[in-house]
Amino acid sequence: MNYRILYWRERFCDFRKSSSQRVNGIPAKKNDDFALVSSVDREGAVGFDRAPQGRVAINALISSCYFIYIDGRLQPPSSRKLGYMPLFIFRDKDKQFKKAVSAHGEYEKNYKKYKVLSRHREAERPVPTILTKFLFDGELPMDKEVYEFLIGACHYVAVAKISGEYGFGAFDVFSDDLEFFFDEFRLFAGDAAEWVAVEKASDLIVF
């Protein structure tokens, strides 16, 4: 094995006790499935960038998902390699998230038309979609409507750990059931990774 993938997985009611303020404020159900995921190389250095195979796994994860780019705009799944973990990634479920993205795009077009028309005459302001509200707000904690939309439209949602103590590429991930995520990420990680479940979040910093 060339590197380890460490993960701490708990029900939300227990996960929130040791999570960031950003994630703690999510209006999740107590039994929703949450995990914190990071990596160490064979020498114990923390971060998915410490082993080439770790970077490959993270890039494969990102390329399968919609993500919020550094400029704040939502991007479709792409094979473009990024030098960072996006703040949010969204794994589409049965094209439900894709439909929401299309609806958001229609809203943006209609809003531009509204801005032009309203300068000259009274015009009906378009109603933003749930996804639009989330993207415009851009910050967690998210409200219950947004959370339930994401749980229904995505196999999983990942939120980057930006504080740095868990190393490059570390993230929280949530769903009503994370089995799809773990099955998929194990495929991305391949045989080079050893998977290690830990008992508490701090075990992902020093292993």
Image (cartoon, rainbow, N blue to C red):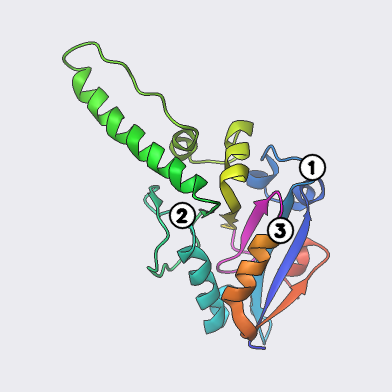
- The residue at 54%/51% (across/down) is 94
Using residue 193 as the reference point, say whether residue 93 is left or right of it: left
Front one among 55 and 205? 55
Can residue 162 be seen here?
yes
Q: Is residue 141 visible?
A: no
- Compute the Cα span from label 3 to label 2: 19 Å
Q: How many marks?
A: 3
Badge 2 element: strand
Question: Where in the figure is residue 48, as x and y percent of width and height?
Answer: 57, 74
Q: Choose between 19 and 88: the one closer to the eye.
A: 88
Is 61 in front, or is 196? 61
In magenta stretch: residue 165: yes
Give the spatial CA distance, label 1 vs label 2.
26 Å
Residue 51: image quadrant is bottom right
Mark 1: few, some, or many residues within 10 Å (few <14, many ≥20)? few
Give, as a single range, the part of the protein colored magenta: 163-178
Q: What residue is rendered at 71% in x and 40% in y?
A: 28
- Label 3 sits on what residue type? Ala
Q: Which residue is mark 3?
A: 35
* Residue 172 rendering spot, x and y as whole percentages: 64, 57
Which circle's residue, 3 or 2, is located before the other in the chain?
A: 3
Mark on residue 67?
Answer: 2
Tell me the SS state at disc 3. Answer: strand
Res 123 quadrant in image: top left
Indicate the position of residue 206 as horizontal and vertical percent values.
Answer: 74, 73
Viewport quadrant of the C terminus:
bottom right
Work out how far the residue at label 1 is from the one at label 3, CA to CA, in angstroms: 14 Å
Tell me, for residue 155, which label it has, or none.
Answer: none
Amino acid type, residue under disc 2 in the picture: Phe
Q: Is 8 placed above or below 109 here?
A: below
Q: In this figure, which residue is indicated by the disc labeled 1? A: 30
